[in-house]
Amino acid sequence: MEFFLSYGLFLAKTVTIVFGVILTFSFAFSAGNKKHNKKGNFKIVNVSKKYSSRKQNMMRFKMNAEEYKKWRKSEKRAKKIKEKKNKDTKEREPCLFIINFKGTVDAEEVNSLRKEITTVLSIAEKHDEVLLNLESPGGTVNGYGLAAAQLERLKKKVKLTISIDKIAASGGYMMACVADYIIAAPFSVVGSIGVVGQVPNIYRFLKKQNVDIELHTAGQHKRTLTFLGENTESGRKKFIQDLNNTHILFKKFVQKNRPNLDIDIVSTGEYWYGVQAKEKGLIDELSTSDEYILKNVQEKKIISIRYVVHKGVLNRILNIFSTII
């Protein structure tokens, strides 16, 4: 028994030291980052060309030499006809721009999203389309509110289709509902139109340790619930009131973008799988992003655009440790 107690104490000390070192490096790294803006670059891929190359390689294996030769001729002929058609109509080939958004709680990915959207808008025309592959369980209201506002910029100029392969819940669905058309995989998670707020409070613990906390505010509702101070019933009521007001704004936003929804039924905070979401009108079609791209590969030039932020070695190490912790 004594061995286990000693080992437990040793383990606790080790974890504390490691955590302290990581925390120190985190603060130092954050301070350094404030002085230097994070730089990145655009990664633009011609997806149509990749699909064409793969198809060509597969056909080479599938067919004998004579069959492959005939197939290549027919492909070249079809390409020339398509180019002539575009030339006659004096319009370039329509494009399907692909953007990926995998959101975290604070929606920091919106910093890349806004750059990607601005770049697309600089060259997009009315007959173009954007496919946003969205994956997010939600997060902060202001973060995802900004992300949704960025998508509204797209919607004003081109058709916006959003694909949900895994999850678009809460703030994720706040983004999704902006789309002109929503597709989702049958077992993707959709919905969760609700608001949650939680604040731990250690006031009673500190009081037992004879630790006093002084909290002074100017303004009746400057602080509602606090981490260290004593929470009051009026503060709790105000906190809940703020949650409800945010929920009302959330519901109005969804209703504006999808007016045919029975908003009272779908805004209970529940989530549904894609099949159920289709029945409730939260999405328009059961499909995947891959299937949607394949449907468009013959008629549109498909371009993937991504703004990649360069992260230093220390930042990557810290991300790994934070994930473990």
Image (tube, rainbow, N blue to C red):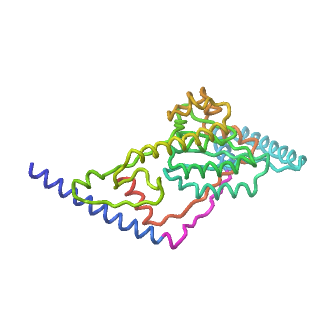
In the image, what residue occupies the spot 39% across and 56% down?
A: 322
Residue 269 spot, x, y in % from top left: 50, 35
Q: Is residue 22 above or below residue 279?
A: below
Look at the image and say whether residue 37 sits in the magenta stretch.
Answer: yes
Most extreme residue toward the right is: 88
Q: Is residue 63 visible?
A: no
Magenta segment: does it hold 267?
Answer: no
Q: Position of residue 209 (x, y in %)?
A: 21, 57
| Residue at left offset 59%, top offset 35% | 184
Residue 140 visible in image: yes
Where, by quadrant of the figure, is residue 27 drawn? bottom left
Q: Nearer the viewer, residue 92 or 259?
A: 259
Left or right: where does residue 295 sit relative to residue 16?
A: right
At a point 35% along the width and 67% down the height, the residue shown is: 24
Q: Which residues are magenta?
A: 33-46
Front residue (pair 142, 56): 142
Residue 35 lies, in percent from the top left, at 51, 73
